[in-house]
Amino acid sequence: MIPFDLYLAFIAATTVLMLIPGPNVALIVANSVAYGTRIGLLTLAGTASAMVVQLCLVTLGMAAVLGALGAILEWVRWIGVAYLIVLGVRQWRASPLDLTRVRPEPRAPREIFLRGLLVSLTNPKTLLFFGAFFPQFLTRSQPMVPQLAVLSVTFVVLALLLDGCWAVLSGRARKFLAGRGRARNRISGGLLIGAGVGLALAHRK
């Protein structure tokens, strides 16, 4: 299985990433502010369902590739490190995102769920991210599928918890969310860069 310290690093890095507002969070916040927490959580159900589909696809493909070419795992890890740092720099320099200006979806529960599903499912960056992020926390000496399964389940659980917090809190904190976009960018970008550097140093040991 995955070494415990590496697993904790995965949880920490994933938590940082989950706190960065993206398309999923923006839609969840918009619907929560407009219609209340219940609708925000229904949006989350849609985005999380898409995430499960994407993780299944990535896990199956990654397990097959890395299982056949185990020697390239270290190179994939370094690509992931570079990706994290680039992501952090872009987040640091990004224009502040006003989450309260995203248009909410129609209130019909089915439309809310389907829109959340489609927004998450059609984001091409998600598959790229999973493919670059997960290999950094894999151990070549252990079977790939169980490790990827543990990471995938953990990722979904964290997404449900943290995006759920966005849904619950967004209606009560609209002004806070609107006014501190640049600070969010700087904090999350710095943490991402730090995570990338930390993982790079850990790989040298």
Image (cartoon, rainbow, N blue to C red):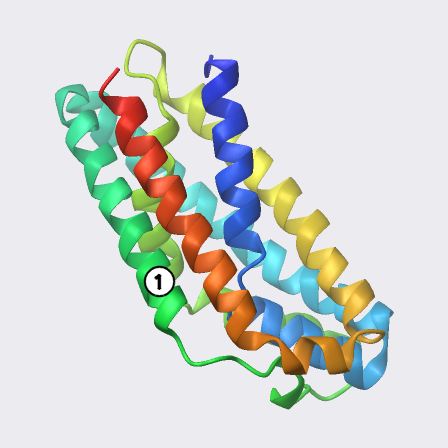
Q: Is residue 193 above or below residue 72?
A: below
Residue depicted at x 33% and y 49%: 84
The residue at which mark 1 appears reads as: 125
Which percent across, then down, holds residue 131? Answer: 31, 44
Which percent across, then down, holds residue 179? Answer: 65, 82
Locate the C terminus and report the quarter of the image it occupies: top left
Crowding near the residue tagged with mark 1, few <14, some 14–19, many ≥20 C-alpha atoms within 10 Å: few
Give the side of residue 53 with respect to residue 108, left or right: left
Residue depicted at x 31% and y 54%: 128
Give the side of residue 24 with respect to residue 121, left or right: right
Which percent across, then down, holds residue 71? Answer: 13, 20
Residue type, mark 1 in image: Lys
Which percent across, then down, holds residue 48? Answer: 61, 55
Q: Is residue 93 above or below residue 80?
A: below
In depth, the one of 62 and 140 nearer the eye is: 140
In depth, the one of 44 and 158 nearer the eye is: 158
| Tag 1 secondary structure | helix
> Can residue 190 be seen here?
yes
> Can residue 118 be seen here?
no
Number of numbered labels in the structure image: 1
Residue depicted at x 49% and y 18%: 5
Residue depicted at x 31% and y 29%: 63
Q: Quadrant of residue 95?
A: bottom left
Give the side of residue 29 with respect to residue 150, left or right: right
